[in-house]
Image: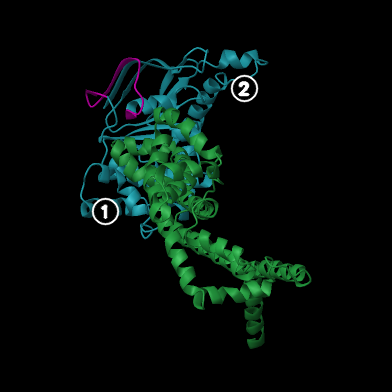
Chain colours: A green, B cyan
Amino acid sequence: MAETTLRIERVSLVRRVLDSSTLYRLIALGVFGGLWQLATLNHKSLLIPTFADTVAAIPDLLFGAQSSALWNAMYQSNIALVIGFAISIVLGIPLGLLIGRFHRIERFASLYLNILLVTPMAAIIPLLVMSLGIRDGAVPARVTLIVLFAIVMLIVNSRAGIRQVDPALIEMARCFGAGELSIWRRILIPSSIPAIMTGVRLGLGRAITGMVVIELLLIAVGLGSLIQRFEARFEGAHLYALIIIVVFEALILIQVVRWIERVVAPWRKMPTFGGGR
Amino acid sequence: MIEIKGLSKAFPGRRGSEPVQALKDVDLEVRDNEFLTVLGPSGCGKTTLLRVIAGLVGHDTGTVLVEGKPVTGPGPERAMVFQSFALMPWDNVLTNVAFGLEMQGVDKKTREMKALELIEMVGLGGFEKRLPGELSGGMQQRVGLARALAVSPKVLLMDEPFGALDEQTRRLLQEELLRIWEATRTTVVFITHSMEEAVLLGDRVVLMRPRPGRIDQILEVPMARPRSTHLDSVESSGEFTALVGLLWNNLRVMHSDVRRTHPATQAEARP
């Protein structure tokens, strides 16, 4: 009897490990790292470090000799990210909701929205730098670019969210005497929250891309300048370690957004509006 | 309670096509404390009729009076139960049931007390903290019913409320509705496409015809109240079977699916 119970427990533990996605993520990471190591072992080159060297460089960047440079760069870059992303949220969500709810605004805004969606943002960096300048780390230019990168996702997903509100719910609210304000507060906004949070997550990814792109392409500050410095000194391991750190930052932030998503909208599984249209 | 005279309503057609005449010259009076069922094939305007009474859509001609006052929009004396339940998935049962009172500006404590009372009445005691997604369809519609009753309406408007439920659940909810109605005697306008349901629940059955939507005839249902205590014997009674049969004969020829291979059927259609 006791033996049976024990076996059931053991099986369920194995099951749990097999079912958890962490295991598969670790395997995927292991396969990737192994292939990298194999590919670079025999072709040592200045800018292509081995996987082991790269991993070893991560603690060096985080806590070692290079740490002050890293944290400085992180701070400089992330300041623009925080401001830019905050602006994107504050402007993008209400804008998307209004566009989705009112057809006149939609007609007016759709052209700009499409331009924003299809324009390669990198192409307008010179314009931004010329008009906003590069003094004091070019914060206005960087913030503007991050907004341009991120805001589309917030607008498009908020719009999709408010459009897929169940019309029966709006009708129900009107039936019980709700005015437009009450309908917004009690029906439209709560209904749209899952889609809005999807927009926040996708927008965050784009914001981080924007943050690095402008620093790499034109204004050498923050992480971008650090990347360029490592590149110029042929410090391949540090270069890739830094990129891995940036990727990890993005993953952590996105995980945080996912967690907020579950807290503010626990009533259903998230619909996905993958990257707009 | 409700007086409707010469009511017509057309919806604009799709690009280039004729407007759709949803209702034409409808005269109808709903008596105080009456349970009125409205039956008809799809496209007969029965739901439009209910939405006009609810004040959700306007009308072109005629008058619609509820308690002597013309309908210009939704009002607190009318409450609706929806076919799709229309519950807010982010709010628990208690908040959903209290929604109508919340919109009327009733303070939180009072409206939650009232809501708890109604939750108990529809048999959902203990479920007040659950989210709608955690409930079965039948339970969700009990929430919808409690929400409508919570505002103490003079008229309960029910738009095929059990249409989305399976046969057994529907049966249980019909019993439940009858039991509650027999206790409260609120005036009810109940839309359905089930002949059995129309006869089982109603004091009178309004039969509507499509294209354009209009009233075909109104039948009195003679079975005595209360019925909720002995639904089975109501359903097996000769009166019930005769009425359902009569309704079916009339409904049959209205259907667009009916093929005119049996001339006899058409001749029999009108009693």
Nearest the eye: A215 or A9: A215
Q: Label 1 near label 2: C-beta < 8 Å?
A: no
Q: Is residue A18 left or right of residue B255?
A: right
- In the rendered image, residue B164, in percent from the top left (x then y), is placed at 50, 40
Residue at the image position 74 percent from the left and 67 percent from the top: A35
- In the rendered image, residue A70, in percent from the top left (x then y), is placed at 49, 69
Determine whether B251 is above or below A195 in the image.
Answer: above
Subunit under mark 1: B
Query: Is residue B8 located in the magenta-colored stretch of the structure?
Result: no
| Secondary element type, mark 2 | loop
Q: Nearer the viewer, mark 2 or mark 1?
A: 1
Residue B80 visible in the snapshot: yes
Range of residues picked out in magenta: B54-71
**Which amino acid is tagged 2?**
Asp
Subunit under mark 2: B
Tag shown at residue B112: 1
Nearest the eye: A166 or B38: A166
Quadrant containing the C terminus of chain A in the rendered view: top right
Nearest the eye: A33 or B117: A33
Mark 1: give few (<14), some (14-19) or many (20+) Cα within 10 Å.
many
- Determine the image quadrant of residue A100: top left
Quadrant containing the N terminus of chain A in the rendered view: bottom right
Q: Is residue A14 left or right of residue A151?
A: right
Tag shown at residue B270: none
Residue B151 visible in the snapshot: no
Residue named by callout 2: B257
| Secondary element type, mark 1 | helix
**Same-chain status of marks 2 and 1:** yes
Residue at the image position 26 percent from the left and 42 percent from the top: B103
Residues under labels 2 and 1: Cα distance?
A: 49 Å
Query: Is residue B62 located in the magenta-colored stretch of the structure?
Result: yes
Q: Is residue B260 left or right of residue B161?
A: right
